[in-house]
Amino acid sequence: MKLLLVEDEKAMAEALKEILQKNNYSVDTCCDGEEGRDFALTALYDVIILDINLPKMDGITVLREIRTNDIGTPVILLTARDATKDKVNGLDSGADDYLTKPFKSDELLARIRALTRRNKEAVPNSNLIYGDIELNPHTLMLYTPSKNFQLTLKESQLMELLIANRNISVSKNTVIEKLWGYDSDVEDHNVEVYISFLRKKLKAANSKAIINTVRGVGYSLTTSDKEG
């Protein structure tokens, strides 16, 4: 699961990122509102943790721009303000939850779980289906008519990205941003390795799903009988 943390207090941002990563979340961090807005508008994240008091652009403005651009990612606001009017303003601007500093890390983790659980419950069957394959992104299971596979987290994230963009090309840069984050030093070779892993699993299952290499662009998921 991928989170975006927008927090200008460096020590707090580093501490929260470490806690979140220890709890198996992938985390991108931003230190000002403008950068946070740009990251959020990519729609790559499952939850956004957004401080209100930010340089360049305050959190409420960031939140409003996110919602104006139809980004429905759940947002948890962080602020030192505890006045009721500030909470109401944040929630009315599109926030899903609100935490007042200081707070316990356990409470933040619980609220993240609650938001993601709520999203799962909103979709009766959240499995992704294309052709003869079916992916459960929560259990990391890939199902085919002849064989099932327990994927790694990165394999599952990559397959989810390909299914979501089926029949169109996904660039290597997009894969890296989605799986490893903007500030990652991961190289194209890493993407090629995970593409190879998935191709071998699909071949082993005699699946009709095919991961094509689009020269100079990236990859696309198609099916040999054009189903899905």
Image (spheres, rainbow, N blue to C red):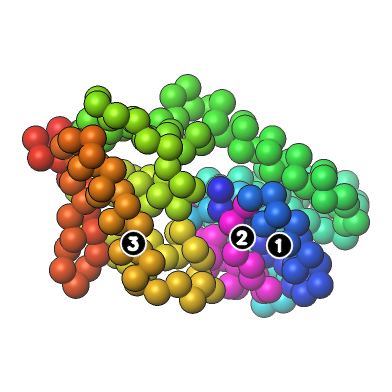
- Give percent across and percent down for residue 224: 10, 40
* Residue depicted at x 20% and y 42%: 203
Give the number of marks. Answer: 3
Of marks 3 and 2, the one in the foreground: 3
* Residue depicted at x 68% and y 73%: 31
- 55 lies above or below 180: below
Q: Which residue is mark 1?
A: 17
* Residue depicted at x 18% and y 46%: 210
Query: Is 188 situated left or right of 157 in this image?
Result: left
**Sequence order check: which comes first, mark 3 or mark 1?**
1
The label shown at residue 193 is 3
Assess whether mark 2 and mark 1 are in contact (beta carbons under 8 angstroms).
yes
Category of crowding for the residue at label 1, using alpha-carbon neighbours closer than 10 angstroms: few (below 14), some (14–19), many (at least 20): many
Circle 2 SS class: strand
Circle 3 SS class: helix
Category of crowding for the residue at label 3, using alpha-carbon neighbours closer than 10 angstroms: few (below 14), some (14–19), many (at least 20): few
Span highlighted in magenta in the image: 25-43
Furthest-front residue in view? Answer: 204
Nearer to me, 18 or 189: 189
Separation of residues labelled 3 and 2 (CA atoms): 22 Å
Amino acid found under the numbered disc labelled 1 = Lys
Amino acid found under the numbered disc labelled 3 = Val
